[in-house]
Image (spheres, rainbow, N blue to C red):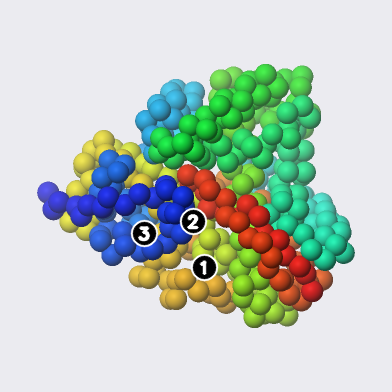
Amino acid sequence: MGSTSPESDVELHTDEALLDPYPRYKTLRKQGAAVWLTQYNMFALSRYKDVREALGSPKIFSSSKGIALNDRVNEALSGPHSGGTLCSDAPRHDILRKIIEKPLTPKALAQLRERITTEAEKHVEKLVAKKSFDVATELSQHLPVTIVSELVGLPEEGRERMLDWAPASFDCFGPINQRMKTALPVLEGMTKYVSQQCVLGKLKQGGWAAMLWEAVDRGEIDPEDCLHLMNDYLVPSLDTTIFATTSAIWLFAKHPEQWDIVRKNPSLIPQAINEAVRLESPIQGFSRVVTQDHEIEGVTLPKGSRALVLYASANRDEQKWDNPEEFNVHNDARGHMGFGFGDHQCVGNNLARLEMRALLAALAKRVKRFELGTVERGLNNMLRGIAKCEVTVH
């Protein structure tokens, strides 16, 4: 039997904490491998080794009872046809994931590369001609909103609300605070839209959403599953990519010598993307339920307890990374947890990389330096990103 775990009364979801979470994560890493959070009634796993182990052990760290930090949302997402891939375990998870990842495999995305590259070049050309623009809204949103929404094949009606739905979903995964309460009605609006609009006859033929109904026809899933799988397309494909792209440009603006390196050697762009996602992880973490007594470095996590798995903390763990708070495009950050790991690794991570790579390559041809203007961080219970990032390009 393990020893008593260290305890912490740290709050991770105040405005102050969300604006600068890293000192709190560092304290948790110093306290121990598994720290009991008295404010949340769950353990925190903040070190790289333990985060990777938890994400790679879905039989012990289960997602099927929800991955949120509050019971209300977890209960809503843990029914027999609830939660989609995010809140399911094998074998159900494997069936659902195989269906939604069909258009997102590297082979499938290869057919989109030219289209995304062409659109990125055209859009960047237009923005650079303006000299000054907001990276968060004018650059980073363009590809996810225009291309992804079309590929999913949603009806035009209501599609403009996608940028409200995604952050609201992530706010609802947090603790029951004011942000979560404000987001609930927005999330209910998304659920209503999906149930009324994402149905046969209203979806674009050949789109990703229509593929879900084809899986129903084949008997692979039930009609009720389509609702939640639609959310898997709508929610993770937007804000995570938008925040990651904006953070990358913000980092290059703060570190012009790193941008010079990439401009001279564009083959480093994939490496730079990994480094940016490592340093500024769009998703801070999700929770898991422990299915059996499990020991981590002498601390027993009892069966039925919940653990908050902190991806963003793992990505700055001093025991894993050299100079973890430094942005360096030469770093090999391929092992980062920014897109998750294991069975639940972000299904759209290849699409996100493709979009980011196209934009950075287009910028590298045209921009010598980014001059930062007004920068404002967004506040979200589970996401970290920049809501406004004005730049002047030279």
Relative to residue 170, is residue 244 depicted above or below?
below
Name the residue beneath numbered marker 2.
19
* Mark 1 neighbour class, 10 Å CA radius: few under 14, some 14 to 19, many 20 or more: many
Name the residue beneath numbered marker 1.
333
**Could you tell me which secondary element the residue under label 2 belongs to?**
helix
Residue under the point 52% across and 29% down: 184
Query: Where's the C terminus, which quadrant?
Result: bottom right
| Residue type, numbered disc 2 | Leu
- N-term mark: 2 or 1: 2
* Mark 2 neighbour class, 10 Å CA radius: few under 14, some 14 to 19, many 20 or more: some
Q: Nearer the viewer, residue 1 or 245?
A: 245
| Residue type, numbered disc 1 | Ala
Relative to residue 268, is residue 47 depicted above or below?
above
Q: Give residue 48's position: percent from left, percent from top.
A: 38, 61
- N-term mark: 2 or 3: 2
Q: Nearer the viewer, mark 2 or mark 1?
A: 2
- Separation of residues labelled 1 and 3 (CA atoms): 22 Å
The disc at residue 24 is: 3
Location of residue 292 (image quadrant):
top left
Q: Is residue 68 left or right of residue 291?
A: right
| Residue type, numbered disc 3 | Arg
Q: Is residue 44 left or right of residue 117?
A: left
Residue under the point 66% across and 71% down: 253
Q: Is residue 129 left or right of residue 343?
A: right
Q: Nearer the viewer, mark 1 or mark 3?
A: 3
Location of residue 266 (image quadrant):
bottom right
Does residue 93 appear in this view? no
- Separation of residues labelled 2 and 3 (CA atoms): 11 Å
